[in-house]
Image (cartoon, grey):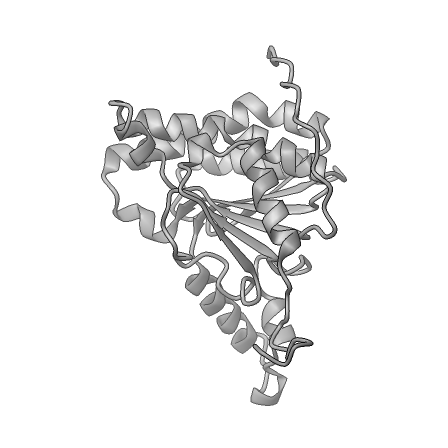
Amino acid sequence: MVVNPAPVSPPLPALAVKPQHVAIIMDGNGRWAQSRGLSRSDGHRAGADAIRPVIRRFGEHGVPVITLFGFSTENWGRPRTEIETILKLGAEFIDSHLDELSENGVRVAHLGGTDRLPIWLRRRVKKAVEATAHNDGILVNLAFNYGGRDEILDAVRQMIADGLTPSDVTPEALEARLTTAGLPDVDLLIRTGGEQRVSNFLVWQSTYAEYHFTEKYWPDFDADEVDAALVEFARRQRRFGLVPSDGVE
């Protein structure tokens, strides 16, 4: 595989504080394509191409965990041809870039059920997870066939199966049964494409997340956009329900 040299990154802005876990809803591929007279498939392909530079930039900032929302449990209702395109692009991304990601220390994990995924995609996801399991760089969670409510229900079912009594049901017990068990909660949730909702994405883990909404479509989300989101995050005063020093919430 021939790997093109990475482009020269812009200088890193100084940040007083950085998020430990960034979650991204990669929205706007279809509208990006439509605005250019292209097909939705072209938009999804451009969106897949945007992933590597974003991973690289967060890694340069030293952000330890990012989670990318690639395909939700609700997305199965989309046209079949569009679903097939997205699934194939997921496989192509792994085939084309797994070696490069691993060489750069990236660790890949999968969030979501695999039961509805075609066997050829399941095998590639398994390969990516296993091949990068011992890397110690940025952790990239690929949320594919993922739904936040389903994840919580699965955790509750597991608590029941484990024989927990009502007094044993605690936030810690539930968190231990989520697919993100052991990871920090989401500090910063980014959504591209101009929409301002979380769409059933990491609903438990994002309870105290800061939101960053941008009009940029996902294929146009680049290193400068990463920097802008992190600069904005660093400026915010996170209160976690506490009364601020001025006494006004």
Q: Residue furthest top?
A: 2
Tell me: residue 200, above or below residue 245: above
Q: How many marks?
A: 0
Would you say 52 lies left or right of 59 here?
Answer: left
Return the x and y of residue 7 as percentages of the image width and height. Answer: 62, 18
Q: Residue furthest bottom?
A: 167
Tell me: residue 34, above or below residue 112: above
Quadrant for the C terminus in the image: bottom right
Return the x and y of residue 226 as percentages of the image width and height. Answer: 58, 39
Tell me: residue 90, above or below residue 155: above
Would you say 44 lies left or right of 232 here?
Answer: left
Q: Examine the rendering and report whether any part of residue 164 can be seen.
A: yes
Tell me: residue 240, above or below residue 31: below
Return the x and y of residue 2 as percentages of the image width and height. Answer: 60, 10
User: Which residue is at a point 50% across and 73% down the rendered structure image?
Assistant: 156
Would you say 2 lies left or right of 135 here?
Answer: left
User: Which residue is at a point 74% across and 37% down the rendered structure image?
Assistant: 135
The one nearer the camera, 50 or 106, is 50
Image quadrant of residue 186? bottom right
Image quadrant of residue 81? top left
The one nearer the camera, 59 or 101, is 59
User: Which residue is at a point 58% across and 72% down the rendered structure image?
Assistant: 174
User: Which residue is at a point 26% across and 48% down the rendered structure image?
Assistant: 77
Q: Residue furthest front?
A: 246
The one nearer the camera, 223 or 104, is 223
Return the x and y of residue 1 as percentages of the image width and height. Answer: 60, 12
Q: Examine the rendering and report whether any part of residue 66 can be seen.
A: no
The one nearer the camera, 169 or 60, is 60
